[in-house]
Image: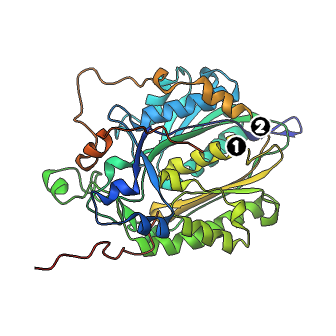
Amino acid sequence: MTVGMEAIRAHVTGWGRYAPAGVLTNADLERIVDTTDEWIVSRTGIRERRVAAANETTASMAAVASMRAIKTAGIDPDEIDLILLATLTPDYWMPSTAALVKEAIGNKRAAAMDVAAACSGFVYAFATAQAYITSGIAKHVLVIGAELLTRFLDYTDRSTCILFGDGAGAVVLSASTEPGGALGIELTTAPEGAYMIWLPAGGAKSPPSADTIARGEHFIRMEGRETYRFATKTMATTALESVRKSGLDASDIDLFIPHQANVRIVEAVAKGLDLPMSKMYVNLDRYGNTSAASVPIALAEAVNEGRVQIGDNIVMVAFCAGFTSGAVTVEWTADPARGRVGEDAVDADDVQVRLPVDWDSVDPIPEALVELLARPGSVDVPLDDVVPGEPERAHSEVRG
């Protein structure tokens, strides 16, 4: 849309992230499933991941990241016109988790809805926000990626339980007639891969029952090899198409922020784009795969660490279940120093999500993690996948 002769553009004006304090290391996983630290690191690059506490939910983590992004943007929460929350682990099937976040941040006027595109969800929500802004429907849009994946994992399945972690990231997109902001966007879906990464039960096709629980159909399932092959191809082609739509070349991009699934995939994307790994931001060693939260968490950290400067061209790119993929190219226009201001201004304990008054859930922490997370010791560590194949047996079996 244009105002007079000036086009409205969508600029990132705020960013924030939240990571739970609980840390699950590869050494911890060695105690509950047949794997090793060496195997996990060599094949995925993951060393540890975050685990939400019993009182934390997707909505509560999203609300903290959102308030930090809003503070960074320097606006009031009630100036947000639209809230888009990407997640595959909502607090409830209804209401939307975005609605819970709206109340928690003190917004009284925004429309709010969830976006379901799994790990690609944040990029899909970003593209939706850009459309709302450039059409003139919204001035400020809050875009969130938040996941609590550790409650949907089978801790006897070493091909999946080693991969995923919890967390949230958010950005504020704002309307401006200044040059820059969101440039080219590319979104794709290849439904022939619909059942390569999926949750079999819980929906209309297979509602929850004692049988679905007994069969373990409420845990994430994944075909590692097929997903790996798709990811290495589609992330590079999707990113390149986004760059092309922006009128740029890959060499014009200062930093790529890929979905943090597996370091091998990121390396393959860098090779496919003929770029050095120094242009790929990687933090999956500390968080694992946080699905829709991985790109916004990585973006917030990259900016706060000084990896992004005003005038830089960055590309965010992701892929996931349903074989969705998405990429957006952005010319960065915000002062990177504001990120630290926003993070320091919001204490996680000060942001609360209202709970139902007539119902209490059971302890949501998976039994396999209860003892590990209760152990003594500091978890105050610095906040500085898909697996290509089924692992070999990590430990030799004792023969009778």
Q: Residue at x 80, y 40 (%)?
A: 333
Q: Is residue 170 above or below residue 351?
A: below
Residue 376 coordinates in the image, percent (x, y): 33, 38
Image quarter where the N terminus lies is top right
Q: Which residue is mark 1?
A: 303
Q: Residue at x 68, y 40 (%)?
A: 304
**Residue type at numbered disc 1:** Val
- Under circle 1, the secondary element is helix
Among the 4 quarters of the image, the one containing residue 164: bottom left
Q: Are marks 2 and 1 in contact (CB under 8 Å)?
A: yes
**Residue 342 tag number:** none
Disc 1: CA contacts within 10 A as few (<14), some (14-19) or many (>=20): many
Q: Residue at x 25, y 61 (%)?
A: 156
Q: Residue at x 43, y 50 (%)?
A: 165
Residue 177 coordinates in the image, percent (x, y): 83, 36
Q: Is residue 135 visible?
A: no
Image quarter where the C terminus lies is bottom left
From the viewer's perspective, is the residue at label 2 or at label 1 nearer? Answer: 1
Q: Is residue 360 left or right of residue 251?
A: left
Name of the residue lying farthest toward the front: 377
| Residue in front for this viewpoint, 353 or 35 | 35
Image coloring type: rainbow
Q: Is residue 142 above or below residue 293?
A: above
Name of the residue lying farthest toward the right: 5
Q: Is residue 225 left or right of residue 71?
A: left
Find the distance from the CA under tag 2 to the CA under tag 1.
Answer: 10 Å
Q: Earlier in the sequence, mark 2 or mark 1?
A: 1
- Under circle 2, the secondary element is loop
Q: Is residue 195 left or right of residue 237?
A: left
Q: Which residue is mark 2?
A: 334
**Residue type at numbered disc 2:** Ala
| Residue in front for this viewpoint, 279 or 61 | 279
